[in-house]
Amino acid sequence: MSEKKYSSKDYWTKNQPTWCPWCGDFTILNSLKWALNNLQIAPEKTVLVAWIWCGSLMPYWVKTYWMCTLHGRSIPVAKWVKLANNDLTVIVNAGDWDSLWIWLGHFSHCFRRNLDITILIDNNWIYWLTKWQTSPTSQKLTFSSSTPFWSIETPVNGLALATLMGATFVARGFTWDQKWLTAIIEEAIKHKWTAVIDILQPCVTFNKVETYEFYFDKVEDLEKNTWKKIISSREEAVKILSTPQEKIPVWIFYKEDLSTYENQCFQLEKWPLVSQDIENIDVEKIMKKFS
């Protein structure tokens, strides 16, 4: 928390987003900015990490430190940023492609390590940037440019996997309701352990099946949300997240406080790694050994 009082303008850039009209990325962008503003997190103490796709452009429009990484590498880069300076608020904006397909291993092992980072998954059940291909979250029998005879694969359940691998904050949001999504992102950032939010985000251009109208019928009415009571048992959370529901629940499913990876590093006990004095460190011997 900073002593300076920040306004919403402090998180906005002069550049304008270039997404398709009605794209859910607009809601995620606004929700993230409002969450940072509500929590009064200093822009200069925040790092937003993304990679290569439509949502990876989001850092361009948030006035914080940021980086767009190599294909599918946003999570490991975010972890190293946190270890280099554990005073920073580190947020990953990922997609169902990079997190649940191309580098699923990074996604899984991130949770067992439990660093204090927040992961947002923009999930629209389809590959949009490559124009209408099935993704790891596409439902069985999805018709697309890459599955013209319908997909026959079972979709990846990202939240169940994250919970099983040790995630300490597991939630789902929906881009139609900015108020609730902002509240969930706020709670995730306040949670000083690894947090993941699966964000239902219809692709308004290429996904003509899982549209906003589709979600209006499927997503549980947030005002009557029965999921406000957070599950206390990891086993129960995995079971519920793995069981098909009549309605798609949206809120925080599971929350637990465990020791973070960085808190167990004795090198970070006194101050962040980036602030430590390295003048008296001599690497000449080890360089000679391996040269």
Image (cartoon, grey):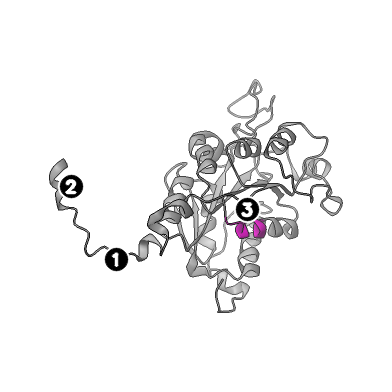
Give the camera-side residue of 269 and 161: 269
Secondary structure mostly taken by the magenta-highlighted segment of the chain: helix
Could you tell me which quadrant the N terminus lies in? bottom right
Q: Residue furthest right?
A: 224
Q: Quarter of the image holding residue 61?
A: bottom right
Residue positioned 22% across, 59% down in the render: 281
Q: Amino acid at mark 2?
A: Ile
Residue positioned 40% across, 62% down in the render: 272
Question: Helix or strand or loop: what does disc 1 sit on?
Answer: loop
Q: Which residue is mark 3?
A: 25
Q: Position of residue 234 (x, y in %)?
A: 67, 39
Can I make out residue 130 in this image? no
Question: Helix or strand or loop: what does disc 2 sit on?
Answer: helix
Could you tell me which quadrant the C terminus lies in? top left
Q: Position of residue 77 (x, y in %)?
A: 43, 49
Picture layout, residue 60 above or below residue 198: below
Q: Position of residue 95 (x, y in %)?
A: 57, 44
Can I make out residue 236 in this image? yes
Q: Which residue is mark 2?
A: 286
Q: Amino acid at mark 3?
A: Asp
Residue numbers of the magenta segment: 185-192
Q: Position of residue 186 (x, y in %)?
A: 66, 60
Q: Earlier in the sequence, mark 1 or mark 3?
A: 3
Which callout, 3 or 2, points to the residue nearer the camera? 2
Left or right relative to 67: residue 152: right
C-alpha gap between disc 1 and disc 2: 19 Å
C-alpha gap between disc 3 and disc 2: 48 Å
Which callout, 1 or 3, points to the residue nearer the camera? 1
The disc label shown at residue 277, or none: 1
Q: Amino acid at mark 1?
A: Asp
